[in-house]
Amino acid sequence: MSPTFTSGKMKKMYPMVRECLKEFLDHLEVYAKDRKDINLKEMHGNYTMDVIATCAFSTKTNSHKNPNNPFTTNAKKIFAFPLHRFLLFVFMPKVLRKFFGFNFISEESVNQFFFDITKQRIDERRAKQTSNKSYNDFIQLLVDANNNKEEIYDNDNDIDESHHVNEGEEERAVEKKTLSINIGNKQMSEDEMKAQGWIFFIAGYETTATTLTFCSYELALNPHIQQRLYEEVESAVDSNGEISYEVLAKLPLLDAILSETLRLYPPVPRLDREAQTEYKVGDTGLQLYAGQTVEIPVYAIHHSEEFYPNAHKFDPDRFMPENRHKIIPYTYLPFGAGPRNCIGMRFALMEAKLGLAQIVRRYRFFRSAQTAVPLQFRPISRLLAAKEVVVGIEKR
Ligand code: HEM
């Protein structure tokens, strides 16, 4: 169940994300008018929670104003679990999950809450299939995918974004074929559909919030880059102060800033693959055996001087169109690579770009007395997380 996030689908979800952003901006206003400090992880976490609740479950949360709504409180119970347990669940190969007994990461009542809400929405849609009302959320995509109504790919792709650095024509063709096979040959059971809703929530909330957090932090520390971004965004808004999906996807500096953030702070710092059969790795002399795990040290690759000179410097120019060709394929892996790469990549980038662009238009992040430099990281190996990320915010 992969080809959910085509550009066409993104465009349809765009207004829903924009709606969540309005609430976020209103909330930031309270802090910005008094030049207060903000806890970036909490603020961005509320935004990504609202987005995933709206786009995946058609549930309105407004976590900024109403932190006690049932969706948010249940979600917070999941995230109260140690982060490593999450990531173990989401990214651990199935066979290891079974071995360690990780079926679900949180208490049964919480799992049930999310299963019930997914089932309720699926039932509603099935009942309404005969009516003309159309939905653009993730649940609808699941229902369509199951009815083989889902479009596999659209022509309106955003190949110019930096995250396509690992994808050549050949790979996209392989990916397309793989995805078509999944959809064409397989009907999802209701349990699988419920599990998809659940995985989406877990995989999409934390990673995107973390990305926005590190990005805002770097902008606070690099006011000249923040100013360049402001100028780029200002030149792109229409007379209503809005940015269309197409324009947003193609802003080079915005794309470069997020790409450089994901290079310096990859939310998933290490990937795993498990060999299905015996395999010789090219002419390296390396031999893999069935069942063997291969670890890909994403964080170390992203911080290697060999691939990224001055690797510890935040330098978005590396990803500007005139320099991007210098990046060696497979040395930039924030979303993984190959047929099991992140299926939420386009969605995450759209959500993060829109949030960042509209925040920077109105407000300025700055380094305050509470801003930790350098950041202190939590000692977790599966997900990159800083202890506390605080910056000041003011109105432009
Ligand atoms: C900046 C945000 C995000 C980052 C950095 C990220 C990163 C990743 C990475 C590294 C993987 C493993 C890929 C591999 O092994 O090659 C992954 C898998 C996955 N991601 Fe994301 N992700 C993000 C946002 C999202 C969002 C928003 C969603 C859903 C709405 C999502 C859904 C998934 C799913 C379902 C998988 C499992 C795919 C599979 O096993 O086939 N992710 N993600």
Image (cartoon, rainbow, N blue to C red):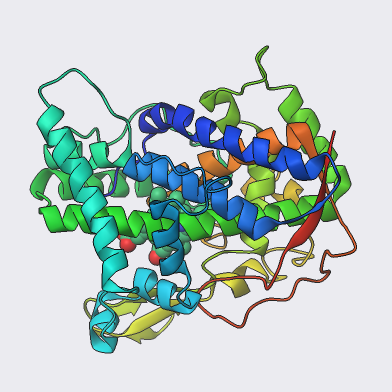
Q: Residue at x 44, y 51 (%)?
A: 69
Q: Is residue 386 above or below residue 138?
A: below
Residue 205 is at least partly visible in this image: yes
Residue 167 is at least partly visible in this image: no
Q: Quadrant of ligand 1?
A: bottom left
On the image, the x and y values in percent for residue 292 come to 31, 85
> In screen coordinates, is 22 left or right of 223?
left
> In screen coordinates, is 117 left or right of 181?
right
Q: Residue at x 74, y 66 (%)?
A: 311
Quarter where residue 151 is shown = top left
- Quarter of the picture holding the C terminus: top right
On the image, the x and y values in percent for residue 282 come to 38, 73
The furthest residue to the top: 239
On the image, the x and y values in percent for residue 24 come to 61, 40
Q: Is residue 298 above or below residue 332?
A: below
User: Foreground: 146 or 17?
Assistant: 17
> In screen coordinates, is 116 left or right of 224?
left
User: Foreground: 277 or 11?
Assistant: 11
Quarter where residue 153 is shown = top left
Q: Residue at x 47, y 43 (%)?
A: 51
Q: Is residue 180 above or below residue 12?
A: below
Q: Is residue 110 above or below residue 37?
A: below
User: Foreground: 257 or 192?
Assistant: 192
Number of marks:
0
On the image, the x and y values in percent for residue 296 come to 48, 74
